[in-house]
Amino acid sequence: MTGLARTRTRIRIRVGLLLLASVAASAAADPLPARDSADLAEPGHGSIGIVHPLRHAVSERLELEVYPVAFLLAPHVSARLVHRTHAPWRITGVYGLSFPTPAMKLTRTYLFPTDGAPIPWYIVPSLGAIASHGARHVLSLRADLAAGLAIGDGDPEPLDTYAPLELLFAPALFGYRANLGIDYDRALTPWLRARASLDAYLYGDRFAARAAVELDLRLSRRTRLVAGASYWDSDQHAIDADFQRRRSHDLFPLLDVIFAY
């Protein structure tokens, strides 16, 4: 074995030992909690990820949520307000307000028509709720409705693109977006959780469905790795070889690192 090969072997062994030590330390800590349920963080605490939003608990009953990078392009905020706790089913209301027009104007060359047609200013209020049951194994039911209120002239065309992107602008482009979802988050070990989700979306005359599976792995006391995949069935106005409308089927990877503070 050459000196370079021995060095690489030592590095791999050290990385493996560090990962094992991290997992062992995680197992000794409090069990990894379920994600995105009706439960809030403790006051003054929260979480943030690469894709996961920044959530900060203002009090035992109120948590605020924003996506830091997206906030610069489309100002928004959501308030998660606890309505029922200390019961088999905990219920939290989710109330949001966003202004997607800056993002629509900045991306009109790529996403929206460039024929000079104006893009009105949109205000998008949203209303939803999450009901969760269980502690170690958590079942959550979700529902929300967002409406796009236009101020000024203009009527942008639908994007006819991948469902996750089109759904972001659906309240403005179609007038509303309704969502029903269910999550099952199961603890496999104190440091590993499995999660399955199903969602149905209705916006204008279109319907989209999403199924996702994810694994949450605790990397440290405050950090978790999320990995999985999501499958989308949606209407992107695609046509087949016979010029017949067909639905689109897309598979996307899910990867994130979430830090709790």
Image: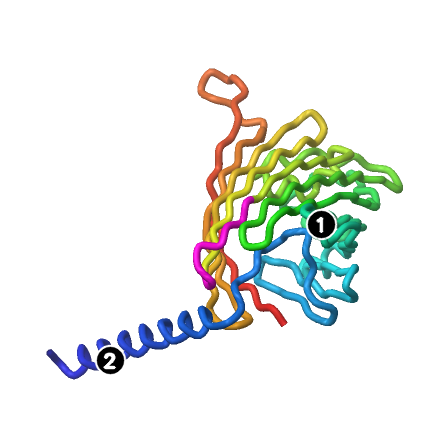
Q: Position of residue 193 (x, y in %)?
A: 48, 55
Q: What residue appears at the point 71 percent right and 35 percent down from the top-left corner? A: 178
The image's mark for residue 49 is: none
Q: Give the quadrant of residue 162.
A: top right
Q: Position of residue 109 (x, y in %)?
A: 66, 46
Q: Which residues are magenta?
A: 184-191
* 31 vs 170, nearest the viewer: 31
Q: Give the quadrant of residue 18.
A: bottom left
What is the crowding at mark 2: few (fewer than 14 residues within 10 Å), some, or many (at least 20)?
A: few
Q: In the picture shown, does residue 257 fall above or below 86?
A: below
Q: How many marks?
A: 2
The image's mark for residue 10 is: 2
Q: Secondary structure at mark 2?
A: helix
Q: Secondary structure at mark 1?
A: loop
Q: What residue appears at the point 72 percent right and 59 percent down from the top-left corner? A: 65
* 171 vs 89, nearest the viewer: 89
Amino acid type at mark 1: Ala
- Seen from this angle, which residue lies furthest right? 152
According to the picture, the residue beneath numbered tag 1 turns out to be 87
Q: In the picture shown, does residue 118 fall above or below 186?
A: above
- C-beta proximity under 8 Å, tags 2 and 1: no
Amino acid type at mark 2: Arg
Q: In the picture shown, does residue 54 fall above or below 243?
A: below
Q: Position of residue 3 (x, y in %)?
A: 16, 83
Q: Report the side of 48 relative to 5 (left or right).
A: right
Separation of disc 2 and disc 1 at Cα?
52 Å
Among numbered discs 2 and 1, the one appearing first in the sequence = 2
* 89 vs 119, nearest the viewer: 89
